[in-house]
Image: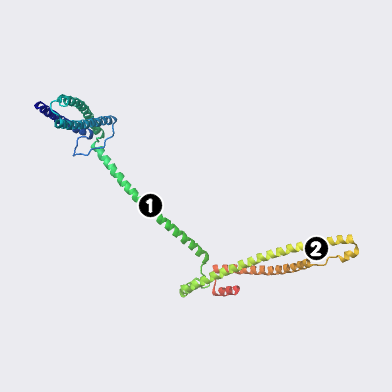
Amino acid sequence: MAQGSDAVERHQATATRLRGEIQQLVKQAQVLLHGEPDARRPSAPRQPNPRRTEREQELEQALEKADWFRREIKRMRQELDSRDHLSAGPADPRERDPMRLYNILVDKRRELEEVQHCSLGLERSAKAQRKAEAAQSALRPEVESRLLRAKKEVEVQKRQNVKLQADRLKLSNARKAAEEDLRSDGIDLRREAALLRPPKPPGGGNPAAAGQAAMEEPPSLRQLRSNVNILREAVRQDERRHRAALKADGVEVDFAALHVQGLQKTVAEREAEIAKLRGVVGGGGDEMRNRPQPGPEVQLSERSEGAAEGNRSSDGGDLEEDEAEEDAEEEFIRRHRNGPSYEDEEEEDRIDS
């Protein structure tokens, strides 16, 4: 019984030592995997290395094996404790054999040594890789200062570009609104310039009298006189257009009347030929009986001829009136340009009436 208790204590001491070794291996693996913590400087981003990736995979496998060994040791320890409590006594040597557990622990120790050897190789490779990365990413002080200045200038340029784009958008909208206002004002100005005429200088063309009359005459009266002249000219132009439209209608009516008259003459000639043919066929008496009488078509032709004569006479009168009106308009424009007097205004009123 004392021999069994000594074997149990020996196994527990071995398990405790193995647990400490496993914890040391786990810490070394974590240091290899994540690097040594350094609070003085932040860890720089590292580029993935294929060899390092393979080493990390091997290290993960080693950690998994160590974890599995830890679980196995714990399970075996629990099994050993349960066997000590539930064993029937020294009569069962197979269940109380201490060498079986010792052999298992020796095998596990051998596997742990292999894992430790692999972890040492991984540690050396990781240290060499960290040195190479530090040497690769290290910059000279002047290069680093130039890089910082370039980054600051790029940031300033970006902010200025954003601000300039916003100002450009605002100015483009304002320019479009100003162009639209200018276009509408130009259209209104051209319309008013087409309607307005320069006012008549008072004083009959005499500069002294014109200046005196301009000083005596109020601006509202001059504006009213200018508006009256504009309205008179507009009414005269409308009347002339109206007479031209009436003249065009009369010409169309005359053309239609002449066309109807020609058709009526053609119909009368055809009827005369038919009557002659009937006279030749039926004899002299029948010819006198069948002679055509002037029908409503001939009477309509005579009426159309009379209407055409009347229209021509009225057209002649209209032409004379148009010529007189054009002469009066030319005289009005000439007097308006040369500065008409009050007598000219009275003469213009008489012509308009």
Of 6 and 143, which appears nearest the observer? Answer: 6
Q: Whole-percent x and y of residue 208? A: 48, 72
Dot 2 amino acid type: Ala
The N terminus sits in image quarter: top left
Q: Is residue 82 above or below residue 233?
A: above
> 22 left or right of 284?
left
Task: Write down the quadrant of residue 90 in the picture.
Answer: top left
Q: Looking at the picture, does residue 102 appear above or below residue 303?
A: above
Which residue is depicted at the point 38% across and 53% down?
Answer: 169
Q: Of the residues tagged 2 and 1, which is closer to the observer? A: 2
User: Residue 268: which numbered mark, if any?
Assistant: 2
Instruction: Answer with left or right where residue 191 lies relative to residue 45.
Output: right
Q: Is residue 257 above or below residue 122?
A: below
Residue tagged 1: 168
The amino acid type, in three-letter code, at marker 1 is Arg
Within 10 angstroms of label 1, few (less than 14), some, or many (20 or more) residues? few
User: Viewed as shown, does residue 241 lie left or right of 183?
Assistant: right
Residue 325, given in percent of the width and then of the height, sits at 62, 69
Front-most of 109 and 34?
A: 109
Determine the secondary structure under disc 1.
helix
Residue 339 appears in the figure: no
Tag 2, which secondary structure?
A: helix
295 versus 38 height, above or below: below
Q: CA distance from mark 2 to mark 1?
A: 86 Å
Q: Which mark is residue 347?
A: none
| Residue 99, x across and y down, in percent | 15, 24
Residue 104 appears anywhere in the view: yes
